[in-house]
Structure formats: C-alpha cells, structure tokens
Image: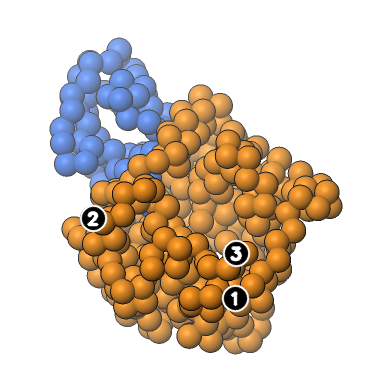
Chain colours: A orange, B blue
Amino acid sequence: MKCYKPSCEKPVVYERKYEGTAFCKQHFLKNIEDKIRKMVGKYKYIRHGDRVGVALSGGKDSSVLLYVLNKLFGKYEIKFIAITIDEGIAGYRNESIEIAKKLCSDLKIEHRITSYKELLGQTLDSKLKISKEFNACTYCGVARRWCLNKAAKEAEVNKLAVGHNLDDEAQSIMMDYIKGDLPRLVRMDPNLEPKEGFIRRIKPLRSLPEKEIGLYAFLRGLKIQEDECPNMGGIRFEVRDFLNNMEAERPGTKNSILETFEKIVPALKQAGKTKVVLKECEKCGEPCSGDVCKTCELWC
Amino acid sequence: MKVKITFLKKMREVDVPEGSSVREAIKKAGINPEEVIINMDGTIIPDSGKLKDNDLIEAIRITSGG
C-alpha cells in the first residue's frame, strides 16, 4: 500500500485496516493530531480560558495526551496542569513517574504529584497485603478516580483530561454489558455533564486505538514503558485479549462497539434507567450515591 | 525461512514460508499484531511488510497501560 496522500512517495509506516488507508510517518502524525483536534471540537472539550488538568501517569497514552494537547492548544489562552498520582506500586510506577517529570520539564508544564499514601494513608502495595476481597484493579481504579478528582479540585482546574483510548472505551462498554451495569454504562456518555463535586472529565483520545497511540509516541520519540502493571488481572484483561483477537481478524470491531454505544445511550437515558442522586460521603465529603463513597468503603 | 523476533527482551526464532509478511511471522511467534509495533533496523514497518530469510525484527509492546 502507499500513503493515502496522492502525491506522497514516502515509505508507509502504518496501515489502518479498519479504514483501508495507509500512512507515511509525517502524514500519520498529522492524522492523529487532526483526530484529536476534531474530538476536542466535537464535544467542546476545551475552550478559551479553561484550566485543564491532564492526568499524567507517564505511560504512553497520557504522555501523548499531554504532548498533543499542548501542541494543539498550548498557544491559546488555556492553562494545562499535569497531575500525577503515585499509587505506590514498587518496581513499576517509579519509572513512569520519572518519564512524566521529564516530559513536563521538556514541555514547561506545571506538574503536580501526589500519592495514595498522601491522600489515603497507604500505598496500593500495602493495601493489597491486607485486603484480599477484591482484585487489585478494583481497589486501584476506585482510588485513582477519587485522588484525581481531589487533586484536580486542589489545582482549581475546570476540566480533567484523561488518556482513555478506543481500546479502554470498548473494554469498559463490554464489561458493563457483561455485568449488566446500565448506570455505569451511561456515565461513559461524553456529553454527560458532571454532577456537583466532580470535575468534568474529557477524553480526547477516545476514538484512537491503543496501537496508534503507541506508534505516535514512538515516532515522536516519547518514552514508552513496555512493562505491564504487576497487579494486572481480572475481567478487563480477559476482555482486552478477546477484543484484540477480534480486531486482528475483524478490523473495525472496537470502532463498531463505541459507535453503537453512542447510538443507544440516548435511549437508555430517556428510559430513566440511570438516575442517580448524589450525596456527600459521610467520611470524606466527596460526592457519592450511598452514605459512604466507594473509596472510603474500600480504603478506610 | 527463519525470522528472528525480539519481544520483551527475549529472542524468538520462527520458521515461516518464503515471502511471509511481518504479520504472519509475529502471529507464528504467538504475538498478537494488535499489541505491538514493529521496528526493523531502526525503521517502523507495517504489518504487511515482507520479510527475507534471517531478518531480525523487534516487536515493541504497546498494550501496557497509559
């Protein structure tokens, strides 16, 4: 295949099978940036005057997110603040935090680092030594959302950008179907206005496959951490492997899952299946649907 | 023909028919093409790239969280 640009003779680095197109390095990088710009415009994710927190783990998705948002919008009246949450996973998170620090230094972006230890009183490693009821991802996922929301409020940002990509979205949609969790499914609607107490989360990478983000990072010279989280496990990784196998044989599977979700979510909301009344957590004061939020329930 | 593939700092060697593509070789090595990008001699090559006997490619994993 040749690069999709008619006059381009440069060697192809990527073939986008779900579209039947191919790209040289230059046009691939531009295409990814154009897609992110369109996603931001489509959902009005970022506007003049915004203070945007960018959840930055130092992994490839969040690094690409910060790099591209800064490239596209850094020259406008928009303030970006990178927020890193150290879960306290020995032998894994240390490396990516160093990557995060270097990226912020190179881009001259304010960087705030906090941790589970600081905000919740213990690291994930120490939590997992004493709590065995749920898998690691349950404890970590709940805690990370809580810590990011708290850190975003402290940074006084009005938006929080997260690096969720097409693979993440397709996996979450499938997991919510499998578990029959309709309220959770509807909360993935990108048009959803946040409830009081929550900073609006935006997902500029949500239509991009993980592979394309990894390739973008590599071609831009951004460091990629190849190690996987040592705690990985649970249903998400079974769904990930299933979807990757499907995509390899049936290109476009993940796009189809996301597009179909976006078509049905208005009907779910209209059917009133998803109304949640929020209160303040009795322990920490953060918004939640019960008397005590999930983070306090699992961590305190 | 034999193709050498490095993946997660380990070398694997696979035996594939002449004219096989990168995709065919890495699938033979048990690696899902959706989870890696391929580097050969410092250049990223697409999955459809054709390999020759004794080629050495590096499969870089990108599904490691973001």
Residue at 62% of width from left, 64% of height from top? A289
Q: Do the residues labelled 2 and 3 touch (CB within 8 Å)?
A: no
Q: Are marks 1 and 3 in contact (CB under 8 Å)?
A: no
The chain that hosts pointer 3 is A
Q: Mark 1 points at which residue?
A: A280
Q: Position of residue A266 (x, y in %)?
A: 79, 51
Q: Name the residue under label 2.
A: A129
Residue A173 falls in image quadrant? top right
Q: Which mark is residue A290?
A: 3
Is residue A32 visible to the viewer in this orientation of the structure? no
In three-dimensional space, the C-alpha distance between marks 2 and 3, rounded to whole angstroms, equals 27 Å
Residue at 60% of width from left, 64% of height from top? A290
Which of the two labelled residues, at mark 2 and mark 3, occupies the earlier sequence position?
2
Is residue B10 visible to the viewer in this orientation of the structure? yes
The chain that hosts pointer 1 is A
Residue at 35% of width from left, 24% of height from top? B27
Please tell me whether mark 3 sits on a helix, a strand or a loop: loop
Residue type highlighted by circle 1: Glu
Residue at 65% of width from left, 57% of height from top? A187
Residue type highlighted by circle 3: Gly
Please tell me whether mark 2 sits on a helix, a strand or a loop: helix
